[in-house]
Image (cartoon, rainbow, N blue to C red):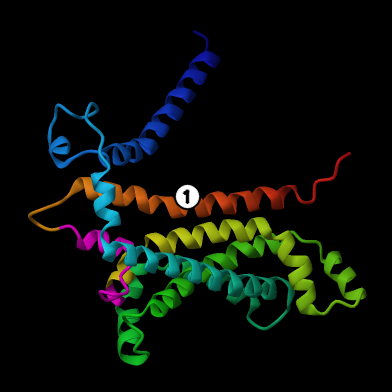
Amino acid sequence: MNKKTLNTALYYLVLVSLIIFSLGPIVLMFVTSFKLKVDIMSDSTAWFFMPTLQNYASMLDDRSLVNNIGNSLYVAIVSTAITLFAGCMAAYAIVRYRFFGRDVASMTTLIMRMVPPAVLLVPVFGIWTFDYEIDGTLNGIVLIYSAMNLPFVIWILQSFIQQIPIQLEEAARMDGANPFQVFYHIILPVIQPGLAAASIFTFRIAWNEFLIANAISDRSTRTTPVYIVNSLTEYNIDWGAIMAMGVLLAIPPIIFTFVASKQIISGMTAGAVKG
């Protein structure tokens, strides 16, 4: 065996190992969601068992879970829309306009993204509860998620806007377009892949975040991660129901990522010209 063949074998060995480590928990969750509790606890029915939809039926019959999923969808979609709306305009202003503190503002957006959410927990809880009195509301959760994700969106969109030739905007202005028309008709279509990538990031963060949502939500505004953790007790853990819940909760991010990914591809090929 020569050196090239050995390197190829090692490459595929590492690749297969990474795939197994990545897909293993997902496959285990999916398989366990179709098991009864007695099959989950039994060593003899690890892979050979009678599948059942009982776990999914019990989850869909739980009205509180359905409400929590609705809360998560509202929070994720609205916070993503607000973050993209504000982030793309802020990124455009930082890249194209000269003003005092522009470089500081650009660097601050990146530094703010490095702050762990746990650091914000206590001040957010105090301000949201005693100053603004918006704790226990979905809009309060949307507001903090938008603020958390906005620095990253600004940072990632700056690189896309910097790649746009300034001559495109100058030509539009010569044709009589005002700044808003230049932004919406020239800039936004070109940075479509960046908007799609940023939307995937912000949606998944808002969908999966637990720590802050657990602190500022109440029984009626809980998101799904909070519901899952609260369903665990010291004396009883229904693994089948939890795995079924995990499968159901994976569907919206997958659909959103698939739709946004198509926007990335269409945006990358929009400027292709047949030679």
The reply to whether residue 145 is in sight is: yes
Q: Is residue 33 above or below residue 112?
A: above
Can you give x and y, in whole percent of width and height, for residue 93 in the image? 69, 76
- Which residue is depicted at the point 52% across and 57% down? 200
- Which residue is depicted at the point 45% across and 77% down? 143
For label 1, the crowd category at 10 Å Cα-Cα, with few meaning under 14, some 14 to 19 and many 20 or more, is: few
Q: Quadrant of residue 136?
A: bottom left
Give the magenta-colored segment's residue range: 215-232
* Callout count: 1
Instruction: Pick the quarter of the image with the C terminus.
Output: top right
In the image, is residue 224 part of the stretch drawn in magenta? yes
Q: Is residue 32 above or below residue 185?
A: above
**Relative horizontal placement of residue 36, taking residue 262 as reference (left or right):** left
In the image, is residue 231 part of the stretch drawn in magenta? yes
**Relative horizontal placement of residue 58, taking residue 160 as reference (left or right):** left
| Residue lying at the far top of the rendered structure | 1
The amino acid type found where label 1 is placed reads Ile
**Relative horizontal placement of residue 198, taking residue 273 as reference (left or right):** left
Can you give x and y, in whole percent of width and height, for residue 245 in the image? 30, 52
Can you give x and y, in whole percent of width and height, for residue 111 in the image? 49, 69
- Which residue is depicted at the point 54% across and 73% down? 82
Q: Is residue 230 above or below residue 56?
A: below
| Residue lying at the far right of the rendered structure | 174
Q: Name the residue beneath numbered marker 1.
A: 254
Can you give x and y, in whole percent of width and height, for residue 63 in the image? 28, 64
